Amino acid sequence: MSNVPSDPAPTARSTSPVLVTGVAGFIGFHVARRLLERGDAVVGVDNFSSYYDPALKKARLAQLENHPRFQFRLTDLADADATAAVFREAAPRRVVHLAAQPGVRHSLTEPQPYAQTNVVAFLNVLEACRHGKVDHLVYASSSSVYGSNRKVPFSERDNVDHPVSLYAATKKANELMAHSYAHLYGLPATGLRFFTVYGPWGRPDMAVYIFTDAIARGLPINVSNGGRVWRDFTFIDDVVEGVVRILDRPAQPDPAWDALAPDPATSSAPHRIYNIGNNHPEELNGLIGMIEQAVGRTATRTDVPLPPGDVLETAADISDLARDTGFAPRTPLVDGVNRFVEWYRDFHGPDTGGKV
C-alpha cells in the first residue's frame, strides 16, 4: 500500500455541463443517465460506430434525449477540428472520456480503428481539455493493460509493460499520454481500469450478452478452455458509482512520489490510475450456470481454445479506490445476471429470434 494520502473531499460541482464521450455506448449511457439524475447538465458525444449494430446505441440515446439538461453532438473525435468545436461550444469543466474502439479479439483482425479511435481521438480530447482549461478529465483504461501478468489480484502498482493485444496497448498508451499532459500542462487526469463490465443495455460482443442471447435462442455457445477462465465481472451500476465518485475528486500530485522508486499508480503530476472491479473473480462455468438458470434453458456447449489476446484470469485490487472514495461493489454476479436477463427479455420481446 502506498503512503499516498487520501484524496481531498469532493469538489463543489460546477454549473457548466459534464462532457461525456461515447454517450451512446454501454458505460457512457449509464454514466450520463446517472449524472442527469443527480442534477448535472450533460453534453454527450458519439459517432455511432458500426462495430456493433448502431440500433442499440440509438435505443440507449433515446432514453436520454428528452431530458431537459441533456444535449447531444454527433461527432467523430478523430477529427481534431470537430472535437475542438464541441469543446468550445459546450465549455465543459469536467470530461468523462469513454469513447473507444473496444474489443480485444477484434483488434487482432482490424487494427486500424484502434489507432484512430483510441490514440488519435484521445490526443484530440487531451488537446481540447488543455486549451479548454478543463478541471478534471476522467478517461477509460482497461484491465487488459495487465496483459501477461499472473500475479493476482492486479494492482495499479504492477508493471503493465507486456500487453497481449493491440487494444491493450492502446489503453496503456492512453495512460501515458494523459500523464504527459498532466505533467506538462497541469491537466488533472484520472484513468480507470474497468474489469469486465456487464448489465442492462450491455454490449452484444461481451460474454454475458453473447451467452444469454445464444441460450435463449437455442444456439450453441463457444466456451474457452472448458470454462476454466476467471473474470472479475463488474455490474454496471457499481462501475457508474465508481466513475461518479472519481469525477468529483480531481487528481492531485502525490507529494510523496519518489522518482527513485516510482509508483505507477500516482505521480508528481496530477495524474492517477484506479482499478474499478468487483474484487471477486468468477469462473466462466459458474456464469454460464447462472444464465441457464435465469433463462430457463440448458446451454449447448462447444469447447474451444483460449483465443489469442485473452488471459486466463482477471482480478481487481480495488483497495485504493475504496480508501480514497469509499467505493464498494454491491452487486453479486447472480443478481446482476438476473437483472441483465430481465432487461434482455424486455428489450427483445417474447420473440428472441431477432438480435441487435
Image (cartoon, helix red, strand yellow):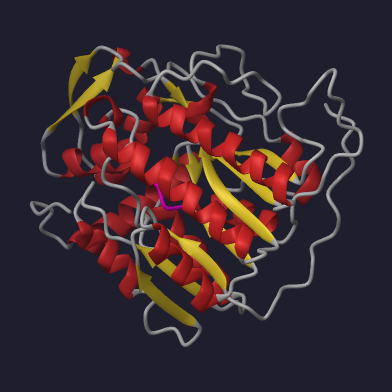
Please state if 297 lies on the left or on the right of 329 as rendered: left
Residue 208 visible here: yes
Which residue is situated farthest in the bottom direction here? 68
Look at the image and say whether residue 100 sits in the magenta stretch: yes
Look at the image and say whether residue 252 sits in the magenta stretch: no
What are the residue bounds of the magenta stretch?
Answer: 98-102
Instruction: Specify the quadrant that holds the N terminus.
Output: top right
Residue 351 in percent (x, y) is at 10, 58
- The quadrant holding residue 192 is top right
Residue 158 in percent (x, y) is at 66, 20
- The quadrant holding residue 280 is top right
Residue for point 31% across, 13% down? 225
Give the answer, above or below, for where 102 lies relative to 152: below
Please state if 319 lies on the left or on the right of 344 as rendered: right
Please state if 220 lies on the left or on the right of 312 as rendered: left
Residue for point 38% across, 23% down? 165
Residue 340 in percent (x, y) is at 36, 51
Instruction: Specify the quadrant that holds the C terminus.
Output: bottom left
